[in-house]
Structures are given as structure tokens and as C-alpha cells.
Amino acid sequence: MAEPATIGARLRDNLPALLILAALALTPPIAEAIGDPFIVKVATRVVIFAIAASALNFVVGYGGLVSLCHAGFFGVGGYVVGILAWHDFNAEPLWFIPGTSNLAITLPAAIVVSGLIAGIVGAISLRTSGPYFLMITLAFNQMFYYGAVALQKYGGDDGLQIMSTITLGGLDVSNRYRFFYLALAVLALTLLLIGRFVDSRFGMVLRAASRNETRVVAVGVDPWLYRLAAFVVSAVLTAVAGALLAAGQQFISPVDMGWDRSGDLVVMAVLGGIGAVWGPALGAAVFVVLELVLSSWTTHWQFVFGIVVVLIVVSLRGGLADLGHTLFSRKRGEAKHG
């Protein structure tokens, strides 16, 4: 049985993540109360990109590997769901596999396909490091992008519309509120999984290798295998986010796997704070909301958005997570002295 001090420390560490999840969980009732269902659509987008940004942060923040091919995995997950749904709607098997719109089947399929691809991409990319790793992952992402464009049967440049009803087992999840809570549950599991990895021996080796690889090798540990495993886990979680995006908006296109989408995920992670498991989720929320608000004000919103991001990153070296840590530390200090 865990000691009370240990339980208290874990609660304090996980409190920001719990608050973020609780705030998101309140979105549907608030939207219902004010009669604005569009808020749920925005919140769903926040949750999906929070999953992807948190997944990317696992290799960027803890593995020291800045990957620009995660948008490719994001798209792979989306296209697995979209293609299987297309074959389901048209009653046409994919080779010998029947089509389906059941997420209980398509999500595991997205996990398997993205995991196999990530294993190959990671095994090749991790033979390099630094700027070379950055460039080779960018090259792979462009391969994914143009591969999606070449899928003329599934829409090519125009993207793939999902015409069938998305279900989870026997449950219809096309309802926006039901789908939102499904995505939120996936985000909670993602944060829990990444948190467990980070606190384990696996995470310790990963962080140590990012700081001083030579020392890790000297004690008899091969960091390459750990990095490959982290890369695959990160890619699979990103693919799950892409699968949810395709299911939620019932559409997926090559635009969702462009290299600039990978850049967006990196910005979300850095904006929220790569030193905290929950930081990228906060960064994704701020990114999506800022993008929506600023684009409604001006056609030159990217310029204003860039200034805001620079100001946040310069003033808060650890991202928005720094602000959260400061506030929680101050409250704990006031409580002790009170």
C-alpha cells in the first residue's frame, strides 16, 4: 500500500492534468446551457490535437528527437479509418478484408498499420541524429503526403469523405457529444500511458540518453532500442489521434498530413511545455483557440499568432506549464504559511 506522502505527491503531480480533463469534460453541458454546439466541435478538435501533441512530446521532450514526420502518422491513422469506411459504404472488400465503420476494429487496425510503418521509419531515421534526423523524418513525411495524394480511388488531392455512420461496437458515436467523450477518454488514457512510461526505467533511460548518450552506452545500455520503442509508441498514439479526427469530421485529406501539420504539433508541445506530460495538452488548447479567434479577426492572423507564440516562449522558457507550476507552487506556499 502506498504511503500517504507518496499518494499526495502523485496527486499534486497529476493535478494539472486532472484539471485540464475536468475543464474539457464540462464543455458539452456548458455548450448545451448556452445553446452553442459549435463549442463542442472546437473542444473535440482541442482534445484530438492534445493527443497528437502529447504523443509527439514523448519523443521530443523526453527523447530529445525532434520529428517532422508525425503528421504522416496522423494521416495514416485517418486514412485507415477512412478507407475501411469507404469499403464498408460501397460493400467492396479491401483485397480479402471486408470494409467496416466500427471503431472497435478500425482503431486497432490503425494502431497495427502505423506501428509497422513507424518501426521501419524509426529503424532508418534513428541511424542519424540532430539535423539529419530532422531532415530524414521530414522526407518520410513528404513521402506519406504524396502517397495520400496518389490514392485517386480514395479522393486523391480532394480528400476522402466518410459516408457511413461511425460506430463503436454497437454504439453510434456520430453524435457530437458522445464522440467528444470518447475522444476525451482516449486523451486521459494517453496522458496516463505517457506518464507511466516517463516515470519508469524506460523513461529514465530515454531522458538520460537525450542528455548524455555516451554515458548511457558506457554503463552497458543501448539507447537505440529505447528510442525506437519510444518512436513507435509516439507514432501509434499520433495515428490514433488522426483516426479520431477522420471519424469525428467524417473526412480526411492529404492536408492533414502535410509537413506544416508536423510543425504545428511541435509548436503545441513547446507552447505548452515539453517538460510536463500535461503541457502539450494545454498547448494544443491554446493553439486551437488562438487560431480560431485570430482568424476570425484578420486575414493576417498567422503574423499575430506568431508574435503571441514568440512572446509566450520567450517569457516562459518552459512553456505554459511553467506558469502552471508557478501558480501551484505559490498556492502551496500560501497554504503552508496560512
Image: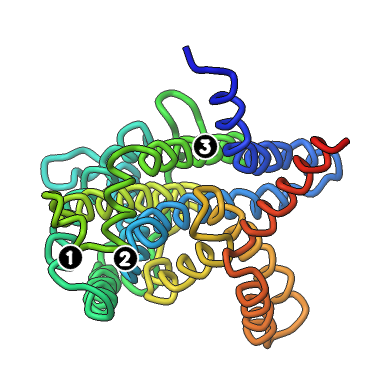
* Three-letter amino acid code at the position of disc 2: Leu
Residue 18 is situated, as x and y percent measured from the top left of the image, at: 63, 36
* Three-letter amino acid code at the position of disc 1: Leu
Residue 126 circle label: 1
Does the CB distance between marks 3 and 1 fall below 8 Å? no
For marks 3 and 1, the one nearer the N-term is: 1
The residue to which callout 3 is attached is: 188
The residue to which callout 2 is attached is: 65
Residue 156 visible in the picture: yes
What is the quadrant of residue 322 in the picture?
bottom right
Does the CB distance between marks 1 and 2 fall below 8 Å? yes
Image point 72% across, 39% down: which residue?
A: 28
For marks 1 and 2, the one nearer the N-term is: 2
Image point 46% across, 36% down: which residue?
A: 192
What is the secondary structure assignment of the residue under circle 2? Answer: loop
Residue 5 circle label: none
Q: Label 3 crowding class (10 Å Cα cut-off): few <14, some 14-19, many 20+? A: some
Image point 41% across, 43% down: which residue?
A: 194
